[in-house]
Amino acid sequence: MKAHKGIKVAREILLIITFCVTIANVVLMIVEAALNVKENNRCVTFRDSDELPF
């Protein structure tokens, strides 16, 4: 019985760690997307001002 209990606890810990890592990945993806949007907006404004013919 003790071996089964240990396996149960280990499985729970692995599930919790996996869950936390998944949430961290989602948060990082959102942050990265937000930073990319800011960078793209900056680049577009610079390009627009550089390409003016007059």
Image: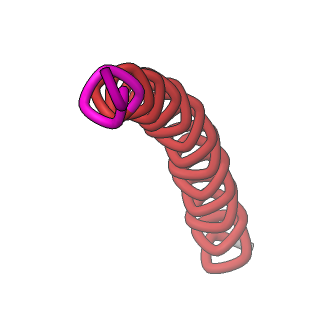
Rendered-image quadrant of the C terminus? top left
Whether residue 53 appears in magenta in the rendering, the answer is: yes
Q: Is 7 or 16 nearer to us in this picture?
A: 16
The quadrant holding residue 33 is top right
**In the picture, residue 26 is in which quadrant?**
top right
Look at 55% across and 43% down and name the residue there: 29
Please say which color scheme the image uses: secondary structure
Image-based side of 36 in relation to 19, left or right:
left
Q: Position of residue 53 (x, y in %)?
A: 35, 31
- The number of discs equals 0
Locate residue 2 relative to residue 39 in the image: left or right. right
Q: Could you say where residue 52 lies in the image, as x and y percent from the top left? A: 36, 27
Compared with 7, 14 (above or below) is above
Residue 2, position as x, y percentages in the image = 63, 70
Q: Nearer the viewer, residue 48 or 2?
A: 48
Q: Is residue 45 magenta?
A: no
Q: Residue at x 66, y 47 (%)?
A: 19
**Residue situated furthest front in the rendering:** 54
Q: Position of residue 51 (x, y in %)?
A: 34, 36
Image point (73%, 76%), residue name: 4
Residues shaded magenta: 48-54
Answer with left or right where residue 14 lies relative to residue 45. Answer: right
Which quadrant holds the N terminus?
bottom right
Residue sitting farthest toward the bottom: 3
- Which residue is nearer to you in this view: 22 or 17? 22
The residue that appears at 68% across and 57% down in the rendered structure is 15
Rendered position, 31 above or below 13: above
Location of residue 33 with respect to 14 vertically, above or below? above
